[in-house]
Amino acid sequence: MARGLSLLSLLVALLLVSWMLTAQHQGASDGKTSAEIAQAQQSASGITFEQAETELESFHALNGTYAGASLGGFGVKLVRADASTYCIEDSASHLDGPGSAPAAGPC
């Protein structure tokens, strides 16, 4: 069920980004559109990180560690994982977990 909810969240984020790109081609101003696209990309990253965090917390609950977890299919890379912490990243931002917010740049 959690995976289904994750996929639904990802679909909503992709639709939002798609809508933002369509709005750009319909004559919106460049400055406003760029800010909207950046906001949509940030929202999509946030949703992707939330899904990956859910998967990592499930793995941790079962195994007592984040080490050895896999995030294939989530669109993020698990850069570092040990018994109590992890760091995941996408192309523009990263998240040191558990319990932190996404930040710009790599792990």
Image: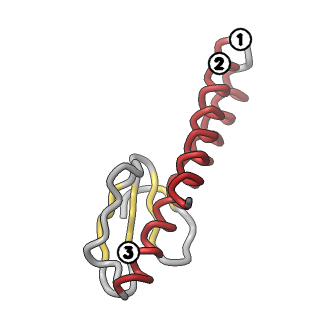
Residue at the spot 62% in from the left edge and 32% down from the top edge: 15
Residue 32's place in the image compared with 85, above or below, is: above
Which residue is disc 1 drawn over?
A: 26
The image's colouring method is: secondary structure
Q: CA distance from mark 1 to mark 2?
A: 7 Å
Residue 80 image position (x, y, % from top left): 30, 71
Q: CA distance from mark 2 to mark 3?
A: 36 Å
**Amino acid type at image mark 2:** Thr
Residue 25's place in the image compared with 42, above or below, is: above
Residue at the spot 60% in from the left edge and 27% down from the top edge: 18
> Residue placed farthest to the left in the image?
68
Report crowding for label 3: few under 14, some 14 to 19, many 20 or more residues within 10 A (C-alpha).
many
Q: 62 or 85: which is nearer to us?
A: 62
Q: CA distance from mark 1 to mark 3?
A: 42 Å
Residue 99's place in the image compared with 101, above or below, is: below
Q: 74 or 30: which is nearer to us?
A: 74
Question: First in sequence: mark 1 or mark 3?
Answer: 1
Does residue 35 appear left or right of residue 80 in this picture? right
Q: Quadrant of residue 39?
A: top right
Which residue is disc 3 drawn over?
A: 86
**Amino acid type at image mark 3:** Tyr
Which residue is disc 2 drawn over?
A: 22
Does residue 41 appear left or right of residue 35 in this picture? left
Residue 62 image position (x, y, % from top left): 39, 82
Q: Quadrant of residue 1?
A: bottom right
Which of the image's four quarters has the C terminus?
bottom left
